[in-house]
Image (tube, rainbow, N blue to C red):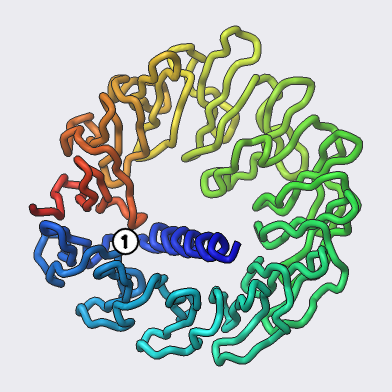
Amino acid sequence: MKTSKILLKILFLLIFFSVLMIESHAESPKLIPYLKGEYWGFCDFDKKVIIEPKFNSVYPFLEGFSVVKVNEKYGMIDESGKIIIPIKYDNVTDFYDGISTVQDGENYGGFDKTGNIVIPFSYYYFKSLKNGTMIIDSSWNYGLMNTKGEKLTEIHFGSAERLTDNIIRVLLNGNLFVLNNQGFSVNRKGFDLIDEEHGGYCRVKLKGKWGFMDTTGKIAVELNYDEVRNFFPSGVAPFKSNWKWGLIDTKGNVVVDTLYDEIGEEFSFGIDWNSNDFGFIKARKDGKTGFIDAAGNVKVPFKYEMTGMWRGGYCPVYTADQKPSRLTLIDKNGKEMFESTDKYNSVGEFSEGMISAGFNGYKKMMGYIDVTSKEIIPLQFEETNAFKNGVAIVKKDGFFGLIDKTGKNVTDFKYKKIENVYNSSDVYKVNFDGWEYYINNNGIEYFDK
């Protein structure tokens, strides 16, 4: 049991590290991982070597630091190549709130950005939160500590997880409670469920009834509902009562009566928060789908069998009065952009004037169209993605490559995998013939044998 828990924590750290690595870079990196033979270093965008290849593996720089690996041990370097954390540990994460979580055997400690140990290696696990608070694990019991190493609570909780920058969810004697960053109980009532924060509120459940908690841990909407779903940016949330759905505001006032069979994100298969900023909310009534606004006004009539997600100001909709159903796009005014067609039954994200579209049947064939359904790049791919800076990742004949907006190949179709690891549009991580390395959006490979 002890070994399995250690393995689970190692897996969590790797996932946590990867998420931070993927989401944190918005611009082109100054230093790109470069593979020469079997060793890794770093180069610039033009492939000029900046840090000589001498590591068994490296991770992209984050906030000026990179985790590196030599002989199965991990450490950290800065952008000059200077070692900040000695390369002798079993695992090292990126800095979070100024602390890197480091594993040494079965124990965990923490380093600051100057390379000093600020958390001693005396815990089974700890996770740095924001505002100087950390979750610590000692003998499979959890508690809170500050960055000075001072305990804020007893180490007696069955679990402890961050909900927001200000509150932590803890399990004690089978009930869930909320603590603030100083370790004080915010709400002494125990709950059956406290959900993750979304839009400034957390869903809470007790004895079959649902409500909302705010980011300070106080009850914002009393637990009076059969079910609730997360708040939309427009400040309303779906609620369920007697098998029907309506909308409430952040104080629990009913703003739309329970008139609908479904409302909200679970029904919507996700919400595109950035593109749907005009406030459309998917709903279903009498077997058909449409959109309402936060006041309950119908914005798109209830006449569709199914609708997709809003992307780039457009939404795919499927007709309810034709079999098989036919697809078209609507804009934010509910206008159908072209006559519904059965040529396409799958569309992707709107990007740089084009939408990936195709037919997903016995054999999936995808290409790119404009919002009037004019074909820009013919249907020929097994997988398509959004264009970024004029380049898109596509899959053809079982392999991935990059194309430009005319459909011309930027790279050969030879990669088993391509992923954008910097959240930029310039650098990609690829897998070719068992080798993993990086390329840029011009097809230049940061790899030499």
**With respect to residue 282, does 174 lie above or below?**
below
Instruction: From the image, tell me which residue sits under label 1.
Output: 27
Which corner quadrant of the image does residue 65 belong to? bottom left
* Point 60% across, 7% down: residue: 323
- Pinpoint residue 75: horizontal percent, then vertical percent: 32, 76
- Pinpoint residue 376: horizontal percent, then vertical percent: 29, 24
Nearest the viewer among 227 and 435 is: 435
* Point 56% across, 80% down: residue: 123
Which corner quadrant of the image does residue 359 belong to? top left
Which corner quadrant of the image does residue 279 belong to? top right
Tell me the quadrant of the picture where the N terminus can be found.
bottom right
Instruction: Count up the numbered dots.
Output: 1
* Point 55% across, 87% down: residue: 147
* Point 65% across, 10% down: residue: 321
Nearest the viewer among 276 and 33 is: 33
Q: Is residue 377 left or right of residue 200?
A: left
Q: Is residue 176 left or right of residue 42?
A: right
- Pinpoint residue 204: horizontal percent, then vertical percent: 79, 57
How would you rate the neighbour count of disc 1 (Cα within 10 Å): few for under 14, some for 14-19, many for 20 or more?
Answer: few
Nearest the viewer among 277 and 140 is: 140
